[in-house]
Amino acid sequence: MESQPVMDLSAALDRFDGDRELFLTLAGMFVERAAETLATIHAALATQDLPLLAKEAHKLKGSALEFCAHPAVTAAAQLEASARQAAAQDVAALGERVHAETQRLTTELKGIIEKGFPS
């Protein structure tokens, strides 16, 4: 998990047509919502609410895709697929992976917001 870069910043900026202000705005929104999304995923895991888990994983996947955050996208996609297939035995481990990758992405985005883009 840690060996893969958190995101492809160059590709993400290309997605935003080089608009760094837009990137920062959306990064701020992602950071603000990440904790709530992870809490909802955690609650859905605890109650085995697979439809809610699939929905939240899908939303997280789309948000992470905006930043070309491939590890988070992959983890969320796998969690979504397992939840949709009612593979309850797989979702706990996948939920932990989604949490870890989302935390890595959030940390990276906070760094860019606070310190600016790397040179």
Image: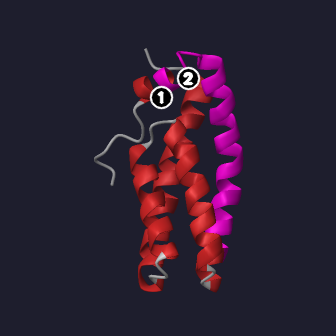
72 in relation to 18, above or below: below
Residue closest to the eye, 36 or 107: 36
Report the residue marked by disc 1. Answer: 12
Please tell me which residue is depicted at 51% across the width and 74% down the height of the picture. Answer: 84
Few, some or many residues within 10 Å of mark 1 (<14, 14–19, 20+): some
Residue 26 visible in image: yes
Amino acid at the residue labelled 1: Ala
Q: Residue 74 falls in which quadrant of the image?
A: bottom left
Q: Residue 42 falls in which quadrant of the image?
A: bottom right
Secondary structure of the residue carrying tag 1 is: helix
Mark 1 and mark 2 residues within 8 Å of each other at the beta carbon: yes
Residue 49 on image: x %, y %: 63, 80
Image position of 30 (left or right of 9): right
Residue 69 on image: x %, y %: 45, 42
Please tell me which residue is depicted at 40% across the width and 32% down the height of the picture. Answer: 8
96 in relation to 20, above or below: below
Q: Using the image, tell me which numbered label, if any, was put on residue 16.
A: 2
Q: Marks 1 and 2, Cα distance to the nearest angstrom?
A: 7 Å
The quadrant of the image that shows the C terminus is top left
Q: Which residues are magenta?
A: 14-43
Amino acid at the residue labelled 2: Phe
